[in-house]
Amino acid sequence: MPRNADETISAAKSTRRCSWSLFMISILSLFLELLLIRWLGTEMWVFSYLQNIILIVCFLGLGMGCSNSREPFHIHKVLLPLSIIVLLLAIPFARAGLATTGMLLTAFASSGSLLGLFQTDFLSVFGFLLGIFVLYLLLLLVWEIFVPLGQLLGRRLDEHPFTIRAYSINICGSLLGVWSFVLLSAFHLPPWVWILLTLMMLTYFIHESGQWGRLNTALLVCIALTSVFASHDGAALELCWSPYQKLALYRRGKSTHADKYTDI
């Protein structure tokens, strides 16, 4: 076979691999974005008032990752912050603490201004600052998840030889990621199913980048196991994740923060 024919076949295979990788990262990015918006927005009622903040942080992470697409991609930079978030939601007292973070910020709402806040008692000021700190750390974890995904997305867009086709693949993958999450929600599937599908997509990139190792394997197993506990509420008689809400049934006098339903 002529050498130019070999080069043509090799280029075609490389383009197909790049297209498929771009398609998968586009699905994963939007699916994971909706997952975090829905899950964190349900468990932390403060996000019912700040519904767009997680969305903004996700896009900020993707954008900053795309701007640094030449940096090496490491899958553990996605798995580690994701495992911390899932672990926090799996530990009952940590989840309860996250749920009440919004109550720490009510001092600002009642004071009407930042100056008025610092004229109140010390405990109100301390609670407000603690709430801001917890909120900042949680959003930092979300940002840390999406920066590596943005790096891989930007790299695949740069490497693809056909710009318009690459952009079309990105749009199609993003739409599929959105509708995949909508479909799971329509069947009332719990968060551990969302996480399992996310891990399956992440496994593809571990295999593609050849980054199988003890750390990544341990993080995958940790996220999969803790997501089961994070999806469970031991105090609830029945628990249902509808397309819009987390619905929990409690005995009278046994309710917790989870009975404060949040529309997503």
Image: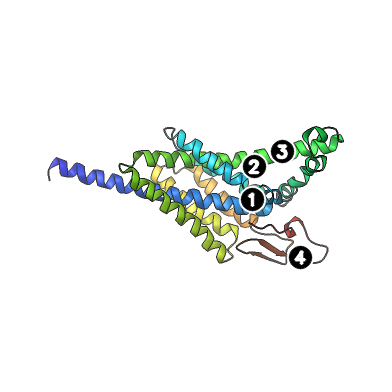
Q: Please name which of the two marks, 4 or 3, marks the residue nearer to the observer.
A: 3
Q: Secondary structure at mark 2?
A: helix
Disc 3 residue type (three-letter)? Ile
**Residue 230 location, x and y as percent?**
64, 54
Q: Which residue is mark 1?
A: 40
For residue 130, which quarter of the picture? top right
Disc 1 residue type (three-letter)? Leu
Q: Please name which of the two marks, 4 or 1, marks the residue nearer to the observer.
A: 1
Q: Which numbered disc, 2 or 3, marks the residue that appears first in the sequence?
A: 3
Q: Which residue is mark 4?
A: 250
For residue 6, which quarter of the picture? top left
Q: Estimate the spatial distance between the alpha carbons at disc 1 and disc 3, rounded to whole Å.
A: 16 Å
For the question of whether residue 26 can be seen, the reply is yes
> Which residue shows up at 33% across the image and 48% down it?
165
Q: Secondary structure at mark 4?
A: loop
Total marks in image:
4
**Residue 32 location, x and y as percent?**
53, 50
Q: Which residue is mark 2?
A: 138
Q: Estimate the spatial distance between the alpha carbons at disc 4 and disc 3, rounded to whole Å.
A: 31 Å
Disc 4 residue type (three-letter)? Tyr
> Which residue shows up at 62% across the image and 53% down it?
39
Q: Residues within 10 Å of mark 1 (few under 14, many from 20)?
A: many
The C terminus sits in image quarter: bottom right
Q: Estimate the spatial distance between the alpha carbons at disc 2 and disc 3, rounded to whole Å.
A: 10 Å
Q: Estimate the spatial distance between the alpha carbons at disc 1 and disc 2, rounded to whole Å.
A: 10 Å
Instruction: Tell me whether circle 4 and circle 3 mark residues in contact (CB < 8 Å).
Output: no
Left or right, 176 with reference to 95: left
